[in-house]
Amino acid sequence: MPAPQESYHLSLVTYQASSRMIKLYQFRPAFGLPNASPFCMKVETYLRMAGLAYECPRGADLRQSPKGKMPYIEDEGRLIADSTFIVDYLKRKYGDSLDARLNAAERAAALACQRMLEENTYWAVLYFRWVDEAGWGLTRAAFFDWMKPPLRWIVPALARRIVRRELHGHGMGRHTRDEIVAIGMKDLAAAADFLGDQPFFMGAQPSSLDATAYAFLANVLWVPVESPLKAHAQKYPRLEAYCRRMKTRYYGE
């Protein structure tokens, strides 16, 4: 099923205007999603789920990030980078209403699922965007076509080389294509089994895990990169229905 093409542009400027607003710095939107980076999309979705006012300034500068990567936020003059540390910071400062109902075992299960998506599934997805030739053309256009020459010609190749090196360092890049497909498929099947017939990953009500799950699953299902992972995810209608449920609830139609 094709990705929904409704605009997410409202999320790119402000959400719940306020005199004191968190600034979210992230990549540009792409593929009909708020962000082509699941980590950026995770933070924006969490902000919406938690009802926190934020804005996304234009022209986010990667060089200003405390850790040299996106996303990062600015809150009352303080810069916080890395999506997990950002969410932890927001929970500490503004309360944790999304996860307050979870017991210790449920929190542990949610963390395990989050780690699977962020530390394993992500690298399989990255391979099919940056290394596999079928996805590289779309990835290059989404991330670099806005640049002016000669950067538009130079930067993509350099970035791709860095991603290849990171994949190898992580370990995913040392596997064959078929082995990476098998790893990704098992993760997607596990995510579908974890969700089951529930409306959200931890039951009848959303939790912070859903910010991660929605961001990563939408970046598989709704990105126009045809891959074995996308084809496998489409075999689970519950995953598609879940993503549409999250989109409707937090981004509108």
Image: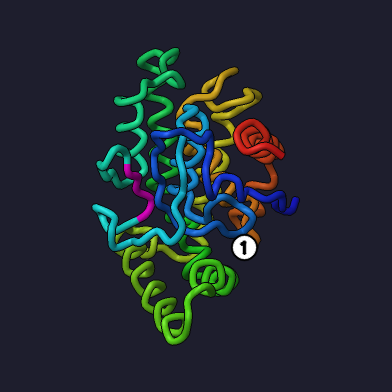
Residue 43: image quadrant is top left
Which span of residues is magenta-colored? 70-74
> Could you tell me which residue is drawn at 39 percent across and 32 percent down?
112
73 is within the stretch colored magenta: yes
Vertical relation: 198 (above or below) 56: above
Residue 208's spot in the image, x, y percent?
45, 29
Residue 244's spot in the image, x, y percent?
68, 38
Q: Main secondary structure of the magenta part?
A: strand
> Could you tell me which residue is drawn at 31 percent across and 26 percent down?
93
Quick one: label 1, few (<14), some, or many (20+) residues within 10 Å?
A: many
> Could you tell me which residue is drawn at 26 percent across and 42 percent down?
77
46 is within the stretch colored magenta: no
Disc 1 on helix, strand or loop? loop
Determine the residue located farthest toward the front in the rendered image: 19
Of residues 31 and 203, the one nearer the viewer is 31
Residue type highlighted by circle 1: Val
Q: Which residue is mark 1?
A: 225
